[in-house]
Amino acid sequence: MSLTRALVPFADFDAHVASQRAEIDAAMKRVLDSGWFILGPEVAAFENELCAAVEAPAAVAVGSGTDAIELALRAAGIGAGAEVITSPLTAAFTAMAILRAGATPVFADVDEATLNLDAAAVEARLSPRTRAIVPVHLYGHPADLDPLMALARRRDLVVVEDACQAHGARYKGRTVGTIGDAGALSFYPTKNLGAFGDGGAVLTSDLEAAARLRRLRNGGQSDRYHHEIAGANSRLDEIQAAVLRGKLRHLRDWTERRRALASLYHAELRGAPITLPVEQPYAWAVYHLFVIRHSHRDALVEALAADGIETLTHYPVPLHLQRAFLSLGGRPGDHPVAEKACSEILSLPLYPELREEQVRHVAARVRDLAAQL
Ligand SMILES: *Cc1c(COP(=O)(O)O)cnc(C)c1O
């Protein structure tokens, strides 16, 4: 390894692959030997195993988390002319999925304590064209769904949960992604459950919606070469499904490990001059990311990098101020809580392969450096 390699890298894919190399090789070989590569027995088995793991009545595997959000909206009849309210503090793909469905994203500010969608802010952005809400379970922390679901029921709105960072997280005991009308998961390689390529899934308890999703993901075909609607090309491949089946068996252990390391960060950082993430009483978080806040974030990031500690910022620019979405009319000051958070947040390394002494080292350096800035 080169000398420039970070002492504590933000992710360690080599260690991740090494820990399950034999299983992965066997899974890939099984697919190569089968000669079937797209939407086959591995995908079907993965969908069933995923349902059991996250306690969802139905799961439909698709090409990515972005596609999962788009297709869940389309399966619910959301498209042109509809407004869909979501958070400005999320991956840009959340809003792109809404646009891809043909609808218009409308941003509502987040709650200061959780950085998840604030139901009062959502209510303030309702219009006669509002058709859906896409709450995001940011960093693996469940959004407070009860007020959002109550609002949605009152206004007859569809709720598609963006659970792309929250595989297996629980809200009041229920798995997120199964509480709204549909939930979207991403299997992007760095997610808590990651493929070795792109992948995603829609969870739903509406079996008719699941049937529509199965047609939508495969060109809108009812029968081979008979296209009922212009669907998408968003099919999970057999190699990714086989890999995901193997990894799914470790998800529970990996999540416990993430939670244990997060507890260690909490213990080691208690009283430090930073803001720590808070697990709300209603939440069982899966810590996709461990995100802290500091008013001199950029200086802290630089000082940590100089010490060989890699951090990232999720995300530096709120969506209403991203160039891609400026045509929606966003301006600085529209969503002050999200805007301030974007200038203060940084994500510390957190993954199952991270060692306790690395967490202690990172926490000690954060504590020292944050006090000096
Ligand atoms: C990763 C992610 C997505 C997009 O998932 P892809 O699989 O990369 O398309 C959407 N929303 C959130 C919150 C994400 O973290």
Image (cartoon, grey):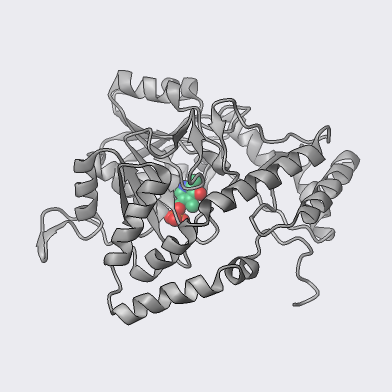
Residue 205: % across, % down: 29, 38
| Quarter in which the N terminus is drawn | bottom right
Q: Residue at x 70, y 57 (%)?
A: 354
| Residue nearest the viewer, comparing 174 with 221 | 174
Q: Is residue 289 visible?
A: no
Residue 83: % across, % down: 33, 34
From the viewer's perspective, is residue 318 above or below residue 195? Answer: above
| Quarter in which the C terminus is drawn | top right
Q: Is residue 10 visible?
A: yes
Residue 84 located left or right of residue 166? left
Q: Residue at x 11, y 54 (%)?
A: 228
From the viewer's perspective, is residue 343 above or below residue 12? Answer: above
Residue 11: % across, % down: 65, 61
Residue 198 located left or right of residue 72? right
Residue 14: % across, % down: 63, 70
Q: Residue at x 56, y 68 (%)?
A: 20
From the viewer's perspective, is residue 76 above or below residue 48? Answer: above
